[in-house]
Structure formats: C-alpha cells, structure tokens
Image (cartoon, helix red, strand yellow):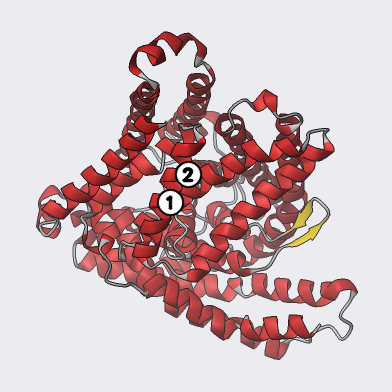
Amino acid sequence: MNTHTRFTLTESQKMMVFILSMSLYGLSNMITELIPKFYLGPIEFSVEYFAFIPLSLAMIFHPLYAAIGASLGEVIFGEIMLGQFGGIGELEKFIAFSLAIFIAGVIVRNPENKKQVALGAMAGVIIHQFISMSVDILKVWVGVEELDAVEGLAESVVVIEGIAFLNDVLFSGILFALLPTLYLVPRLYGKIEPLLGMKPRKNDLQLGLSEIITVPFILAVVVLGSLSFLFEYLSETTFGWEWEAPLVDRFGEWIVFPVMVVPVIIALSVIIFLVKRKGRKDTDGYSEVV
Amino acid sequence: MDMVKTLTDKLSIEQVKIEILNTAYGYHQTFLQRLDPRTLFLWYLVFGVVPFFIHQTSVLIGLALFLIVLTAMAKVSPLIIFILTLGLLTQGGSYLIVGLFFGGEVTAMLPLLKLTLKLSVISMASIVVFCSMSPEKLSDGLLKIGVPGQVSFSIGYAYRMLPTLVEEYHHIFLSYRLRGKAPVKKGLFYSRQLFYYIKLLIKSFYPLMLSVAKRSRTMVEALESKGSLYGFNHPKVKQLKLQHLKIKRRDVLFFGLSISYFIILIGIS
C-alpha cells in the first residue's frame, strides 16, 4: 500500500527500546526524587521530572514502547525501589504519562524538524500535567466528605492545583522538557539507532490520520476514559448517600462497606481486562504506528 | 550557613548512593516477608482502597493504629517514613493556607486532618506491602496474577542494573565537572551554581543514553539466544517458574484476622 518503506521494528528491537527507555527514565526519576524543591510563596520551583528522556526516545524510536517503558521505569526505580509504591494510585500516573509521551512521539513525524519536536515536547507535558491536575482535584473532592461544609476548600484545591499546573508546564515543561529535547533529539538522531541495530526514522515519513488512530491508540483512549468514568462514578456513590438511608437504618453502618466494594471491584476488573487485552495486542503484532 | 554546611556534608552524593542501595536492597526477615505475594496483593486491595471511602474518624484512627503496628513490624527504613510524612504535611498544609485565604476558618482543619489521616493509612498500607516483598517475590507475584512477563523481567533487570547505572552516571557527571568551569559568582540564592549543576545533570544523560542503548541491545540479544522472549508469556514456563508459590496457613490467618479487625472496627462505630 505504502509507496515508501515503512519504519517497522522487530519484536526484539521493541524490547530494546522498552528496556532503554525504562532504565534511563527510571534512573532520572531517582535523581529528580533527590533534588530539593524551592518554594517562592505558593509557587514551587522543583525538578518535577526529566521528561526530555522519554520524549526524545519516543520521537526517535517507537512512541508506544518508549512511553510504556518510561512509565514502568518510573514505577520500578522511583517507586518500588525507593519503597514508595502507591499501588493503585500509580495506575493513573502510568496511564497519563504513557498517553502523553505516546502522543508527543506521534506528533513528531520528522525528528529533524525543530518546530515539530518543540510542539511534541510541549504537548506531551501539557497533556500529562492536565490529566494529573484533574485527578488531584477529584481526589480531594471525593476524599473529603461534606466538601461544601468547609468554606473555600473546593475553590482552594482548584486554585492550588491550577497554579501547580501552570508552574509545571511553564517551569518544568520549558526547562526540563522543551530545551533538553531540542538539544538532544538532533544529536541523538542517526547516532543512537545504529547502536540498537536499526535504521533512523525516515525524514519524509508522512503519516495519515488512519495510521495514527490505531488499535493501541483507541485502547489507550478507552482505558483513560473508563478511568475518569471510574472516578466520576465513585464520586457519585460517595456523595449520594441520602437515598440509601433506609438500607443503612436496617443493617447498620457497615452496609456501606460491601456496597462500596462492589463498584470498585467491577471497575478494577474492567481496567485490568482492558490493559490485558492491550498487552496481548501488543505482543501479537498489531499494525505498526510509525 | 553552618547548618546548611553540615546538611550538605550529610547529603553528599556518596551518602545518597549508599542510602538508595540500602533502601533498594536492604531486606529484613520479617513476618510479612514470609507471606505469599498473592495474600499481600489481596490484603492491599482491601486496605489500600477501601479506607478512601470511609468517613468515620474512629474507624480511620483504628486502621491507622493497626497499620502503624504493621509498619513497625515490617521494619521500613526511616528514609521512607520521613519522605511519607513530609509529603503528607506539605500537601495538607498548603490546602489549609489557601483555604484560609478564601475565607475558611480554622475548622477547615478538621476535614483536612481527616483526609491526611486517610491518605496516610493508604500510603502505610502500600509501604507495608511493597516493602515486605523482595524483588523476586514481587515479580513472581505479579507474574502469577497475570501481569505480562516483560514487566516482571523489567523489575529483576532494574534491580540488577541500578548500581551499575548510578555508578556510570556519576562518572559521566564527574567528568563533565572536570572539563567544565563552574560559575565564579554564586548568583542570587546560589541560582547560577544551581543552573550550572542542573545543566550538567541533563547533559550527562547524552553519553549515558548511548551507552545504555548499547547495553540494552546486548541484553536483548542475550535474552533472544536463551529463548526468553518466547518464554515470557508461555504458560508452561510460567508454571515451572512459579511452582514455589503456595498459600499456607499463616497467609489465611493473617488475611482473615486483619479483615475481621476491619469489620469489627466498622461494626463498633
């Protein structure tokens, strides 16, 4: 179908990209965990993450494997090894970060085009920070009962998270994603690929929209959508206690417990099922994205 | 300034390296260590998720006490506990300050304290579970519950490679420092120096990327020659590998007792 030769990776080359992205981003994550933070009033100057590593790898190699590898590296090096693994809370980070890096990698069609690289880097950071901001806000809204009873809490959470979002995008985004990516991608392009035994991505590679919207992309969107739906749904169940009052009267407070567990388990199993299906698609060889 | 000096002495890179390796590899033989990973996962699913939807303070306090005991039993490293409390305090504190600014009162404290309590219960649950699993156990457990073999391989690989990577990165960083010239003026709040070092930290990744690329190729080729890429998700290979995982009496006891404690807590309040 295609007139030009497609940039395809073998199974083991994908594994190489995965391991490369995982170990590098994992190591950088350990370092950023240790760099102290500076506060200037409510504005925080911190090295949030070295996003340039997965960003440049996603632009140079396969976006999906670089993205998943980086997220896994963060979980293993930055969380499990330092003993701060947050369990299920990490799932949200994992999905958000993978999606952001993946989209950033897909945006860049020609790694030598600086404009595309810059656009991709900023898009990746903005998507990731936006998702994590929304989740943080929801966390407080769901976690604190009688949110309205506390004056100013709902607004203050939005303000704090909004400032953090802007701060992360402008400070971390420019200093640790945009500039280093612009520095690294042209230097690495053509140099790092032979080390993994592959040819550089073609300059004239043009992707149609149908090639971007492939199975993994749709699945990622579905997973993300169901996750946000899960949050939405849970918030409904915790806030909507009133109509369950008779049940509580009859069985006592503990009825709350099993009632709440059911939606959690259902939602979790849906997510696990989706993730698993996604994994299987990956190994069975779906149509290549890039 | 003296205090800053002593602090920087204590926080030398060598010290940090040692502390990281300690946290990553230092395992004690505790009771929780001997449990089956699946028990721990299931236990975590209950104690790491359900507290989020509990709003009675008494239940939360009861849970927190229980988890403090477990955390003490798991012999968690002090560094982790320090990071945990710091994170919880700063988050709760910043919400409080801005909440006051928006016309809330000090009573705003109470729900926030509750949220902090809740979050600390959840974090303690994850620390207890994931600190009492050695990397082999964690990766075997993940494999058993159906996580792809690549993930459990990656955990093992990360534990193997961490010291090498840290060492190599440190070397590159030092050689950049040797060749470069640190700014003479410190700048406002050490800002010049800070930017210089951060720039070096970023630049050091360039050579590291190339050498890690080479290394990951070697790794994958070694895996290929052993047929591991094929075996990762092969049911028979998995079965052979995971034979040693068995649910014993202590697993059932631990899970049963902690769940009944939870239910009694909810029943009482």
User: In the rendering, at what x and y percent does residue B174 appear?
Assistant: 63, 86
Q: Is residue B193 left or right of residue A204?
A: right
Q: Residue at x 57, y 35 (%)?
A: A139
- Determine contact: label 2, label 1, CB under 8 Å: yes
Res A184 label: none
B39 sits to left or right of A45? left
Question: In the figure, is residue B115 to the left or right of B62?
Answer: right
Q: Report the front residue among B26 and B216.
A: B26
Q: Residue visible at 42% across and 44% down?
A: B62
**Residue placed under numbered mark 1 in the picture:** B65
Tell me which chain the residue with mark 1 is part of. Answer: B
- Disc 2 marks which amino acid? Ile
Can residue A285 be seen in the rendering of this structure?
Answer: no
Left or right of A56? Residue A280 is left
Spatial CA distance of label 2 from label 1 is 6 Å
* Farthest bottom residue in view: B178
Label 1 residue SS: helix
Question: Does residue B122 sit above or below A197 in this rendering?
Answer: above
Q: Position of residue B49 (x, y in %)?
A: 41, 39
For the N terminus of chain B, the image quarter is: bottom right
- In the picture of the structure, the residue carrying the numbered disc 2 is B61
Type of amino acid at the residue the image marks with label 1: Leu
Residue A214, horizontal then vertical, whole percent: 44, 32
